[in-house]
Image: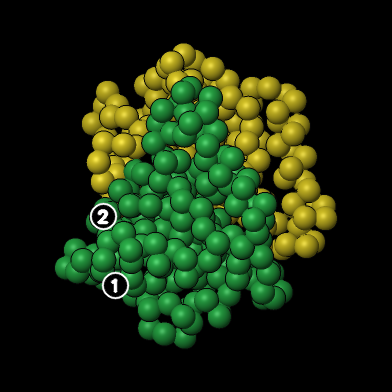
Chain colours: A green, B yellow
Amino acid sequence: MDNLFVALVHYPVVNRRQETIASALTNLDLHDIARACMTFGVRAFYVITPFPDQRDLARQIVRHWTEGAGGQLNPDRRQALEKIRIADTLEDVIGQIATERHEPVICVGTSAREGGQAPVTARQLRHRLTVTNDSHLLIFGTAWGLANELLSRCDLQLAPIQGSDTYNHLSVRSAVSIYLDRLTND
Amino acid sequence: MDNLFVALVHYPVVNRRQETIASALTNLDLHDIARACMTFGVRAFYVITPFPDQRDLARQIVRHWTEGAGGQLNPDRRQALEKIRIADTLEDVIGQIATERHEPVICVGTSAREGGQAPVTARQLRHRLTVTNDSHLLIFGTAWGLANELLSRCDLQLAPIQGSDTYNHLSVRSAVSIYLDRLTND
């Protein structure tokens, strides 16, 4: 999927009281999501945080596994973490992708709750990815999910993952994995 | 899925050189897999390790989120971690499930590699879960996956998750999430 990108957002996201916050980096988010992106052929995985020290930390983790001891011991992990790019804002990411591919960038929000706009299913999005060259950026929120101010700026919103009942509190690592599988496998 | 159980095995699993080892507990495995099990209606999630101190650690984590401060702050997480049961061996787990449900227990192994036996697809397994009352125990390995000595004792083996190419190094947290989604959603 040459035109599919993934972004993990640390601001603006919400806490359990639905207040807008900036969340801290989680090491395993980087590993799990990079491995899923590598497995399912995502072009790049952007880690977005406005805090310079958190971006430094993310770069340090990535370097350990791409250039340092981690990557020598574990080449599979190296390949996965090479997918990671660190960014300051969503706007920066959109600009970088537009510069790289010279195609429009379609922002696809995700949420565990139904959004204001009619959601697209994974099947519909997979169809879009094959019939258009547009770049599609699949955007995930940390903490309790993306803030509405970001979701409302997205061009599309993916339908929430439904479980067997009303409970739906997957980790962002699980949600990314499930959506990428759905976009790849029937 | 009243007849579906999940187990996470810390021994016998293999390391990157395919040697049989026992792995250490990972906190986020408990959280992510419990949340996926709760979302997709799995009956119980067994964490299996032969080390008494690791079982104590697992119990301490579970208690914090079910009876302690964590569960009061975050009732959704409490519900998920209440799915967790701690066990010493796979045999113990099979015995517990048989005692609880009075039905045969079918062990379903998972691996990122093709097994010796013909694999079942998630669709085939979903069909089985609806047409039989047998308990099905979906077994996942930590580290580099389940050792062959355990896989060869399973009644069935799920087909590996295929990505877009040959690379297939998902975290166990991702693999559980994807399989449970496939068993629930079409």
Q: Which residue was labeled with disc 1?
A: A104
Q: In which quadrant of the rendered image does the N terminus of chain A lie? A: bottom left
Give the x, y percent position of residue A72: 46, 23
Q: Which residue is mark 2?
A: A1
Q: Nearer the viewer, residue B140 or B170?
A: B170
User: How many residues crowd mark 1 within 10 Å: few (<14), some (14–19), many (20+)?
Assistant: some
Between label 1 and label 2, give the one nearer the viewer.
1
Residue B65 appears in the picture as rendered:
yes
Measuring from the top left, give residue B17's x and y in whole percent: 43, 16
* Residue that protrudes farthest toward the right in the picture: B69
Where does residue B179 sit, x and y in percent of width and height? 39, 48
Residue, far bottom = A116
Q: Name the chain letter of the residue that bears numbered label 2.
A: A
Is residue B153 visible to us here? Answer: no
Q: Residue at x 68, y 69 (%)?
A: A21
Q: Residue at x 57, y 40 (%)?
A: A61
Name of the residue lying farthest toward the left: A131
Q: Are marks 1 and 2 on the same chain?
A: yes
Q: Would you call the spot at circle 2 few (<14 residues within 10 Å), some (14-19), or many (20 or more)? A: some
Nearest the camera: B97 or B74?
A: B74
Q: Secondary structure at mark 2?
A: loop
The quarter of the picture where the C terminus of chain A appears is bottom left
Q: In the rendered structure, which disc, 1 or 2, sits on the residue that comes first in sequence?
A: 2
Name which residue lies at 47% across and 34% down.
A66
Q: Amino acid at mark 1?
A: Pro
